[in-house]
Amino acid sequence: MLLPVALGAVLAAPGTKAAEYVFVPSLHCVGGPYGLDLPEDARQLRSLGTLLREETAEVEQWDGYTATRKTLFFDGLVLGVVEFSHAPTQVMVTHVEISRPEWNRLVPFKLGQSTDAVRTRLGPGAKGDVALERTYGSEADSVEFRSISGIVAHISYSCYSG
């Protein structure tokens, strides 16, 4: 059975080529060798930089608490999260889009970095992916890149969130 993240990476709109999915077992959206370095306390996320806006997508009512899906918009950083009313310090990251180098401090891959350096960090599965067109992921989380002339210009994480 394909997990939703893997299925999303495999399927593409009609007439477009599906990206190849490369399994990287230790890839996680937060922590580890490939994940984001975010504050441990969810209440500190809004102080990462100047918050431009915040959108609530969904509020789920559970047994005695709510889970709220939100997107936080900073200049060059879009951060999707789930916040829990019964545990205000905990957060689940759902997706991340990085498009400005000011946010390089949060990720092991850097905007402005060569695609060669990213391929080296990702390991043998990235060999031959000169423009970083593949999707790299574990059983739950994945990362994709956009590059221009051999330089990383955009980083996108998709994270399992239930």
Image (cartoon, rainbow, N blue to C red):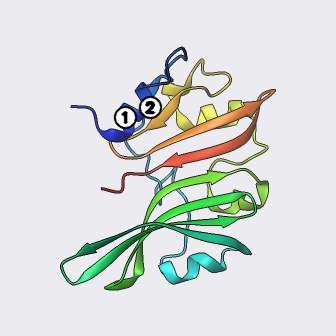
Q: Amino acid type of disc 1? A: Ala
Please state the horizontal and vertical placement of residue 31, each as a whole percent of the image. 47, 60
Give coordinates of residue 53: x percent, y percent: 67, 71
Q: Residue at x 48, y 76 (%)?
A: 40
Q: Nearer the viewer, residue 62 or 33?
A: 62
Q: Which mark is residue 43?
A: none
Of the pair 55 and 94, the residue shown nearer to us: 55
Drawn side of residue 158 relative to residue 138, left or right? right
Quadrant into which the N terminus falls: top left
Res. 112 image quadrant = top right
Q: Secondary structure at mark 2?
A: helix
User: Residue at image x 64%, y 45%?
Assistant: 155
Indicate whether 50 appears above or below 43: above
Identity, as a three-letter code, of the amino acid under mark 2: Ala
Q: Are marks 1 and 2 in contact (CB under 8 Å)?
A: yes
Residue 71 position within the rendered picture, expressed as x and y whole percent measured from the top left = 55, 64
Q: Which residue is mark 2?
A: 9
Residue 110's place in the image compared with 59, above or below, is: above
Q: CA distance from mark 1 to mark 2?
A: 5 Å
Element at badge 1? Answer: helix
Out of 105 and 140, give the one closest to the viewer: 140
Quadrant where the image shows the C terminus: bottom left
Name the residue carrying label 1: 6
Q: Say which quarter of the image contains residue 116.
A: top right
User: Which residue is rendered at x = 49% and y = 21% of the image?
Assistant: 18
Marker count (numbered): 2
Determine crowd level at label 2: few under 14, some 14-19, many 20+ residues with C-alpha closer than 10 A.
Answer: many
Instruction: Give me the residue at 70% from left, 48% from top.
Output: 110
- Label 1: few (<14), some (14–19) or many (≥20) C-alpha neighbours in 10 Å: many
Residue 22: give x, y in percent of width and height. Answer: 44, 28
Q: Is residue 124 left or right of residue 107?
A: left
